[in-house]
Amino acid sequence: MIPRYTRAEMADIWSPETKFRIWFEIEAHAADKMAELGVIPREAAAAVWGKGRDATFDVARIDEIEREVKHDVIAFLTHLAEIVGPEARFVHQGMTSSDVLDTCLSVQLARAGDLLLDGLDAVLAALKARAFEHKRTPCIGRSHGIHAEPTTFGLKLATFYAEFLRARARLASAREEIAVCAISGAVGTFANVDPAVEAHVAEKMGLAPEPISTQVIPRDRHAAFFSALALCASSIERIATEIRHLQRSEVLEAEEYFSPGQKGSSAMPHKRNPILTENLTGLARLVRMCVVPALENVALWHERDISHSSVERGIGPDATVHLDFALRRLAGVIEKLVVYPERMQANIDLYGGLTHSQRVLLALTQAGVAREDAYRLVQRHAAPAWRGETPFFDGLAGDEEITQRLTREELEGLFDLGHHLKHVDAIFERVFGASSAG
């Protein structure tokens, strides 16, 4: 994590102080249930809560102990004993380190998931508002980067809304899947810790019990979580790439908000660069790079090894921090995006109606011309219009092979922009619901 791309709310989830507080809560809740079961004295469980609930865990002290014992959980338990006193000997009864580590990671990922879902909601709200604002703002649709047929800018944004709605559903599912607790002992058999302890800790920590663990929670859960983050990041990059293309000087249909006093280049005062969406493209790459290590963590040796541990210490904070920042930045970009409807219309008209070529083709076939011949006739006039030599309509209207089949009035009717927008309401209803029509 670097401060430049880190929001405080997400950073707090991954701070050592938060981690040790979660570790304490896991141990203390486990002690409560063990006391209820008669495994440890009730006074011991009360002492753990009484002395630890409001304690400040000394990160430096825990690190100092770890340098000697070379074990993070033992270092924490040793420091906890310094705080609690003799009753601390009853803490961690029958548990193994992964019971604490994995359950803590589940809590952290679930909390991170909640923040990310909030970020997705902000993006969805921004997309919906701007989509309705430009529901009927015509713009040229492009395939292969080349003018195709007209669409609307609202439809463009609606496609992103639908995509991010899917991203939210995937993340919500992944958040639920990762929110599990394992307090099952050395190899997951509950030999020295009652399953009731796991159920109690799970309830108190807002988790579900892992149905069957080994010494660890199965890592396919984590792989699913990071995959959901990566897909979300790819959706961020898709819309960022679209905005970057629309901001190009020769296109300039939309651009990032350029604030008063902002500078675009140290050398060229005229520059207004799409720096925010370029940044989002880079952040998306950082999130996606966490997927392969997460997938490779699934195959651990037997009941457990720790090859996954170093990976998760990195990708847990990195992926969630970067995606959290990216979602909030994207929401701001969309909210403030400057849109130029006049330029969109100018680009539609750039080739003199050339984008209506399919309508002419279909009309000729309906008038009895073989499709191959109709295609040849239309393309014959599309080529010079593309080169800027003859307006497309003029070429068609001056071709006797075409005017024998279609009158000038019929040709003019084929150049109606409204034809391409007649189902906008229906598409909006599919995306946003029945209330969006009209």
Image: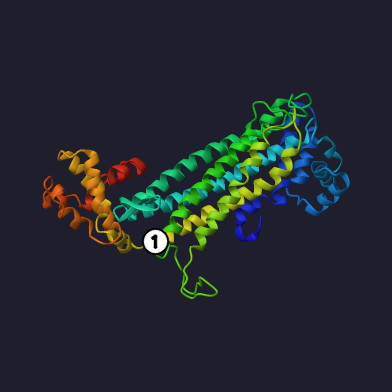
Relative to 124, is 36 above or below?
above
Horizontal side of 123 relative to 149 (left or right) equals right
Q: Position of residue 61 (x, y in %)?
A: 83, 52
Residue, x 51% and y 50% (percent of image)?
A: 119
Q: Position of residue 344 (x, y in %)?
A: 32, 60
Q: Residue 178, located in which quarter of the rendered image? A: top right
* Count of marks overlaid on the render: 1
Few, some or many C-alpha atoms within 10 Å of disc 1 (few <14, some 14-19, many ≥20)? many
Relative to 420, is 212 above or below?
above
Relative to 424, is 130 above or below?
below
**Residue 269 visible somewhere in the drawing:** yes
Horizontal side of 15 relative to 67 (left or right) equals left
Q: Residue 93, located in which quarter of the rendered image? A: top right
Q: Nearer the viewer, residue 85 or 163?
A: 163
The amino acid pointed to by label 1 is Ala
Which residue, given by chain and number where applicable, does mark 1 sit on? Answer: 254
Q: Position of residue 416 (x, y in %)?
A: 20, 52
Q: Nearer the viewer, residue 366 or 5?
A: 366
Q: Residue 425, located in which quarter of the rendered image? A: top left
Name the quadrant of the N terminus.
bottom right
Q: How is the image coloured?
A: rainbow
Residue, x 71% and y 41% (percent of image)?
A: 25
Please tell me whether mark 1 sits on a helix, a strand or a loop: strand
Horizontal side of 367 relative to 283 (left or right) equals left
Q: Position of residue 29 (x, y in %)?
A: 71, 36
